[in-house]
Image (tube, rainbow, N blue to C red):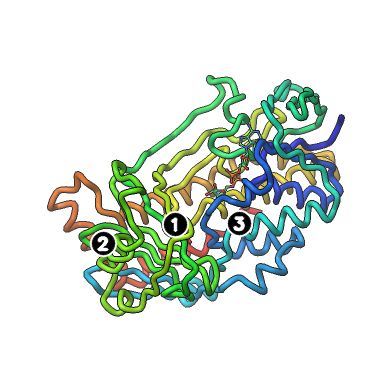
Amino acid sequence: MRTQVAIIGAGPSGLLLGQLLHKAGIDNIILERQTGDYVLGRIRAGILEQVTVDLLEEAGVADRLHAEGTVHHSIELVFNRTRHPILVDQLTGGKVVTAYGQTEMTRDLMDARAAAGLPTVYEAANVSLHDFDGKTPRVRYEKDGRTHEIECDFIAGCDGFHGVSRQSVPQGAIREYEKVYPFGWLGVLSDTPPVSPHAIVYGNSERGFSLCSMRSLTRSRYYVQVPLTDKVEAWSDERFWDELRLRLDPDLASRIVTGPSIEKSIAPLRSFVAEPMRFGRLFLAGDASHIVPPTGAKGLNLAASDVKYLSSALVEYYREKSEAGIDTYSDRCLRRVWKAERFSWWLTTLMHRFPDTEGFGQKVQDAELDYLVHSKAMSTALAENYVGLPLEL
Ligand code: APR
Ligand code: PHB
């Protein structure tokens, strides 16, 4: 089989890239090692920057987003049992974010791909990448007991942190940067009305970080910081709800609507970047190349901006026979990636309690929070990063 672009991974990156390439008349196939239901079963945040919303509109998959997504004009910070609004739209000249679960975005992209009759191979096993340092890359995979080979012009590694694409790059050709945080997030999903449906609430109390979010007006998502040694089995729903309330201000705590958890898990936090993001005819995009701690809600948005740059570069190659976009892809992505890595690290450092913070360090964190909510300059810096920095076009 032959195609123009072979995409590895049917997560948000792969599906969005496939849709944008299809819209531009560029043939592509997606190879995904899991089933479609498995991919849809992943619980992930969905706080979309305007850049991401615009991209979903360009891809023709934004109808449900506009019908069911919730626009947020502000966020709230809670510390010292007091809640402080950060009016991001006023601080950024009207920019906002939209809360719309990643699962729903993935579902919309899957449905659009199926409706267009585009090829997606689910349960593609043992995918391997070949000859991407030349002009005739190939991809192999196993399905139904047979080995299949795809000849292509380009390979897009959209297969996430644990994927095969980054692992296929020769060790000497790639440099990795990583920071692992000394705590995890215990997350609960519940079919209860969100306590703050129009503003995500980030808390920093002496007991640790907390977050109040949502998936819809009837489905809430909450988190509390826990030690990495904690096991989810040790956290009953009741213990979780009690702990969450202890980390909020009294008013918000009193308004939490509790209910049975429909999903409960502990996730570690890491910052990670692999450089560069292009190796001959192989391009990495999304989690395949970088990971952020979820604090700043940047993971999905960085995947979208990588895909915007990559789809534009490939369209330019096929339409104008120019390799300018391809040659600048990695540097353009990494300038935006590192700014989002910085913001995610900064907000994580600001809002969490670190096991080894001495008295001085805690006083500095307290002062930074106090300065942030009383300084227009500092609040603006938070707001413009939260709504998303402009793309380099
Ligand atoms: N072969 C084929 N598919 C693979 C392989 C492989 N060897 N390894 C991984 N995959 C698939 C995974 O099953 C997954 O469906 O690649 C997909 C990668 O999707 P994500 O991990 O979601 O990464 P990405 O599409 O870049 O989306 C980033 O997802 O994880 C969140 O927080 C992250 O919001 C961000 C977004
Ligand atoms: C979530 O809804 O899961 C979420 C929201 C905002 C964040 C992180 C996670 O910053």
Residue on which the image places disc 1: 296
Mark 3: few/some/many CA within 10 Å (<14, 14-19, 20+): many
The reply to whether discs 2 and 3 touch (Cβ–Cβ < 8 Å) is no
The kind of residue on which mark 3 rests is Thr
**Is residue 51 shown above or below 20?**
below
- Closer to the camera, 231 or 292? 231
Determine whether, in the image, residue 161 is placed left or right of residue 366. right
The kind of residue on which mark 2 rests is Glu
Residue on which the image places disc 2: 368
Mark 3, secondary structure of its residue: helix
Residue 251, image x, y percentages: 30, 79
**Is residue 95 shown above or below 338?**
below
**Is residue 233 shown above or below 208?**
above
Label 1 C-beta lies within 8 Å of the nearest ligand 2 atom: yes
Residue at 52% x, 34% y is 274
Mark 1: few/some/many CA within 10 Å (<14, 14-19, 20+): many
Q: Please tell me which of labels 2 and 1 falls first in the chain.
A: 1
Label 2 to label 1: alpha-carbon separation = 17 Å
